[in-house]
Image (cartoon, helix red, strand yellow):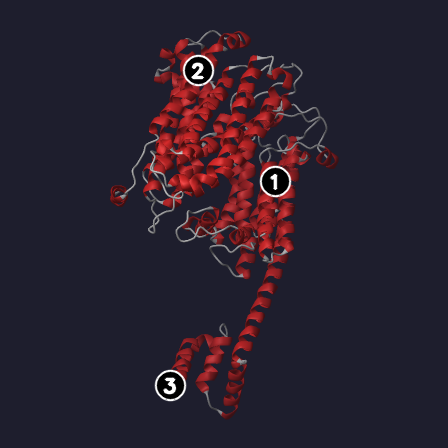
Amino acid sequence: MSDTSDAVTTSPRRIGSPVGLYIGAALLAGVVAAVIGAAYLGQSLDALGLPDPGSATTWGLPLVRGIGTLAACIGIGGFLMSDLGTPPRKDGYLDVDGFRASRTGTWGMAAWAVCALLLIPLYLSDASAAPLSDTLKPDMWGTAISQVSTAGAMRWIAILAGLAAVLSLFSRKWIWQPVFLALSVISLVPIALEGHSASGGDHDYGVNSLLWHIVLGALWIGGLAALVAHAARRGPHLPELVKRYSWLAMVCIIGVTASGLINAAIRLSFSEWFTTDYGRVITLKAVLTVILAAFGWAHRRYIIPQLETAMDTKDAWWKRPFVRLAIVEVLIMAATVGVAISLSRIPPPVEFTADISPAELTLGFDLTEPFSVSAVFTHWRFDLIFGTVALLLQAVYLWAWRVLRKRGVEWPVSRVIWWTLGNLTLIFVTCSGLGLYSMAMFAPHMLQHMMLTMLIPVFWVLGGPMTLLLRALPPAGKNGIQGPREWLVVFINNPVSRFLTNPVVAAVQFVIGFYALYLSDMFEWMAQEHAGHVFMNIHFLISGYLFYWVAIGVDAAPRQLSPFMKLLMTLAAMAFHAWFGIAMMQMSEPLAEAYYLSLQLPFPVDLMEQQHTGGAIAWGLSEIPLVLVSIMHGAQWAKQDKKEQKRFDRKADRDGDAELEAYNAMLAGLKTGENSSQAEYYRAEYQGDEIQGFMHSDKAKREYRQKHRE
């Protein structure tokens, strides 16, 4: 801590504090949520047939959740600033601005964890109508977590947010900031998995759209709060940071608007926006979002162009044009958060029908015909997570390719085709009938699994995305602030990446996921949860990408292996995959039997046949990647030899083919019995693995170099 303290004491800047703004915004979010929630509580309780839990719960629950949600946004913004907004010192530690931003993230996550803990007894009181004084007793917390889904979600939030707070409290290394940022964002995920969005028909759309809505909203609010704090500290690079945030805000506004409209459309028709209580609150939220979008336009149109001049003024930090506008914007954002939270206290005007099938109730959609090739190509349902990710990955890649073309830099079209094939395959695997049936039947699930882990990553690594981005993204420069390019470099060159790209580690993590998931109780639990399906798909993609990045990747990996070692690693991994498929076919009991039976599909499904078919798919399809990898190894080997030949030709052109002349002179010396040391050197240099050269290589090289110097 001493180096940080020195940096703080030697800073000549006058430090302002946004703590008052943060506290005021958090209180505003909580109060707005409590006031709106209390206004509609009576109607909500009548609609749900629940008794009044008491004023302490009625006002306390939305108040605490509003304060906690705003604290989470502020914490995410703090880590976002320490990650991408403040250059580290030469020793890899955060500078004074980065340290303060990171500490904002720490305390924001700590407040979010405390609020989540307080919400556990509050949600038990709300669900059971028991007085809050009773549900605050420690022995009641276990009941709340096990019986109230929202209370269980709050437990996970407290764990994740608390972990981010504790870990960041003990680290000032710049390289750890993205880890804390990721943990902070993940702490928001349980919110999307409970409440109105996670129940009833189309809840897959509801959960996925709410997940985008929450994450993008937190980045939007937190990023602006972090900028206000940076301005209060009179931190450097503010104009550049505001320009970066402007692009982030634009993306967030588009995403928040689109996801909000999708989520609202699931629960009510457009006419009900103005005729129901739930709709009127959504209308208020939409109006506030439009106002915030207007603020963003004002920043881009008026504030950013004059920001450089405004930085030179002697006014107090809170009097500057950017800060004044940003403070008002933060307060409106806090009010919007409060309005959004109040929606969880108002039942939407959804007509629940008695004929909803068990499959639709569990999956969010219905399946009416058996799985077939025709069903795969005729049933489509866009996946808001993986379909959107595929489109975003394609857009970023094409942008980078266009940047290189504008500069006149060549980039192989074949790599563009490979990358496009990968993203199109991801859309097909998750959005076609294969993606739908994979959640309800084991054989389609295994087919999807194999394509996610053994086909899409092959296409991706052959596209060379990291090399393309490193060439397209602008460098920060000596005194600039780090950006995506610098973090991509850190991602490639760090101890964790070097460990993961070790051939043994890459092969083991590629294989072990199959055995750990399907030969334990883990699949039984994950198959029943929407989050479990999302997690499995993410794991398959990342695991496959790491393996094939080492095996055949175009991008340079932290560890460079010979083509022979790559082929050996691939052969070993494929053998274990084949054994896994055989093990699946020999199992006598079906996996996740209770879950599959609970779907009550309207067509017969033989669970053991599905499992045996899935094992056969795992066994048979594991050979296809091996063929692809072998072909690519041969092509890359030939390409490497061609490069080496061109390098030797260029060297010969430069030195007049001196190496060939030396070789001819050595042959002439052998004929006359002279130049024995030179001949010995040749054998050592060009017959490295032959016994004669191996035995005398070092000695021959030393003799030759000594004679050459003489």
Of all residues, the one furthest to the right in this rendering is 374
Nearer the observer, disc 1 or disc 3?
1
Between the C-alphas of marks 2 and 3, the distance is: 91 Å
Q: Position of residue 131 (x, y in %)?
A: 39, 9
In the picture shown, does residue 447 fall above or below 368? below
Asked if labels 3 and 1 touch by Cβ distance under 8 angstroms, the answer is no
Between the C-alphas of marks 1 and 3, the distance is: 66 Å
Q: Position of residue 552 (x, y in %)?
A: 57, 55
Q: Position of residue 418 (x, y in %)?
A: 63, 50
Residue that mark 3 sits on:
710
Identity of the residue drawn at 28% across and 43% down: 11
Q: Amino acid under label 1?
A: Leu
* Mark sitting earlier along the chain (1/3): 1
Residue that mark 2 sits on:
34
Q: Amino acid under label 2?
A: Ala
User: Quick check: 599 left or right of 692?
Assistant: right
Residue that mark 1 sits on:
391
Q: Secondary structure at mark 2?
A: helix
Badge 2 crowding class, 10 Å Cα cut-off, few under 14, some 14 to 19, many 20 or more, is many
User: Quick check: 626 left or right of 230?
Assistant: right
